[in-house]
Each structure stands twice: as structure tokens, then as C-alpha cells.
Image (spheres, rainbow, N blue to C red):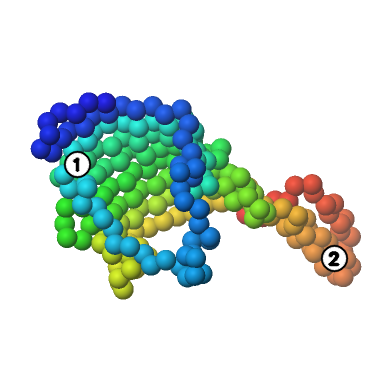
Amino acid sequence: MDVAGFTPPGINFDIDIDQLDIDRYMPPTAGGKSAGGQKPPEQPFDLSGLKNLRANGTLRIGSLRASGVKASNVRLDIKSNGGRVDVSPLAANLYQGTLNGALAINAAPATPTFAVRQNLNGVSIGPAAQGSGRQGHTGRSRQCRAGCDDPGQHGCGAEESLNGRTAVKLADGALKGIDIAGSIRNAKARLGTLKGEQTQQATRSRRPISPN
């Protein structure tokens, strides 16, 4: 890591981290609510520190945990100058799949803008959603933009100012404990019996798989 100049400083870095658990350093929360049981108000984005930031470098993390999500082989290439921050690529291995994308923040205008491009491929939703009973592998692509300086202001929330497109595909999906395909086959067998057809009843499968 090196610094060139001081008004403002130019920072160049190439950092490798073996393991990082961000959750260890975060304060405990009660389901995102304050002590009085109310959800704390959203605070305006303070991106003033980005306006004079000049940085260029790569950050690699072998094993990362953040907000309960585990990832490995994380890589971020970061460039920042004049209030604009570009992170490309933003890549990681995530629950037997991969994440590839990019993030751009422009803090120079009065209303900051955010842009994200994200592609998930082959991510296993079983480990990612523990306790939900869901299985399968998902692929998702997302390309969105938003402009906002105060998420608490009406019309400026992330959902209200967001525009773009997203697509989700689930392959080899299943719900634990529910034999979806077997239930359909057995229903067809019973219907055939009522019609006088000779239909063999389907046997219960060990692993539930949903139909396409």
C-alpha cells in the first residue's frame, strides 16, 4: 500500500486477507429494531468522504462472512476519483456458485447515484436459506440504477427510486418433505383408476423434485 500526494492523497493498494468475519465487529441488534421496539429511522447517506478520495487497487479475501452470508475467493477492483467509485469486478464464490458483477457510486452531484450489475450462477439456495426447506440452484442477473441522498424522504427510498431489470431462474428445485413430482404422479394414477384405466401408482421418491 502506498500514498502519493496529500491534497488530496492518492492511495494505491493491493491487499490480501485470509479470513474476515465482519459480523464479529457489528453491534448486536434485536431484529433491526431499537430498544423501544420501533425500527430506527433511516439516516441520510453521508458520502462526503468519497468526494476527495483518490484510490486505485485490489482487495482479495479468502473467506468472508457478512450479515450471515458466507463467501470465498472474494475480489474487488476499486477505482475512486472525483467523487465516483467503481468496483469492477466484484466477484466471489458463493454457496457452490459464483457471483460476478460491478458497483458504481457517484457522490459528485447533489443527489448521489448508485448502479449495480450482478450475476449469480449455480448458487445453492439450501445453505443460503437455512431452515426454509428449499433446495435447488439459482441463477440471477440484475442491472439497476438508483438516485437518492436521504432514504427516509418520501420518493427517495431505494425501492421508489430504483429502476432497471432483474431475472431469476431456479433449476432442480425442491421443498424438503414434500414430494411434488410424486404427488402429481399419484394424482394422475388415481384419476386414471376412476376412469377405468390400468395405471400403476407411482412410488414415493426419496428426493423431492419439483416439475419444470
Q: Residues within 10 Å of mark 1 (few under 14, many from 20)?
A: many
Residue at horizontal 16%, vertical 44%?
52
Query: Callout 1, which amino acid?
Result: Leu
Real-space CA distance between mark 2 and mark 1, rounded to the nearest whole angstrom: 69 Å
Q: Which residue is mark 2?
A: 190
Q: Residue furthest front?
A: 35
Q: Locate the C terminus and report the quarter of the image it occupies.
A: bottom right
Q: Which residue is mark 1?
A: 53
| Front-most of residues 138 and 50 | 50
Q: Is residue 147 left or right of residue 30?
A: left
Residue 3, label in figure: none
| Count of marks placed on residues | 2
Q: Locate the N terminus and report the quarter of the image it occupies.
A: top left
Contact, CB < 8 Å: mark 2 with mark 1? no
Query: Callout 2, which amino acid?
Result: Arg
Q: Position of residue 162 (x, y in %)?
A: 33, 62
Q: Secondary structure at mark 2?
A: helix
Q: Earlier in the sequence, mark 2 or mark 1?
A: 1
Residue 193 appears in the figure: yes
Residue 137 appears in the figure: no
Q: Residues within 10 Å of mark 2 (few under 14, many from 20)?
A: some
Residue at horizontal 45%, vertical 44%?
25
Q: Position of residue 50 (x, y in %)?
A: 22, 47
Residue at horizontal 42%, vertical 50%?
141
| Front-most of residues 1 and 91 | 1
Q: Position of residue 74 (x, y in %)?
A: 43, 34
Q: Position of residue 39 (x, y in %)?
A: 45, 67
Q: Is residue 206 left or right of residue 133?
A: right
Q: Is residue 84 left or right of residue 203?
A: left
| Front-most of residues 98 and 12 | 12
- Locate residue 113: give its quadrant: bottom left
Q: Is residue 3 above or below residue 174?
A: above
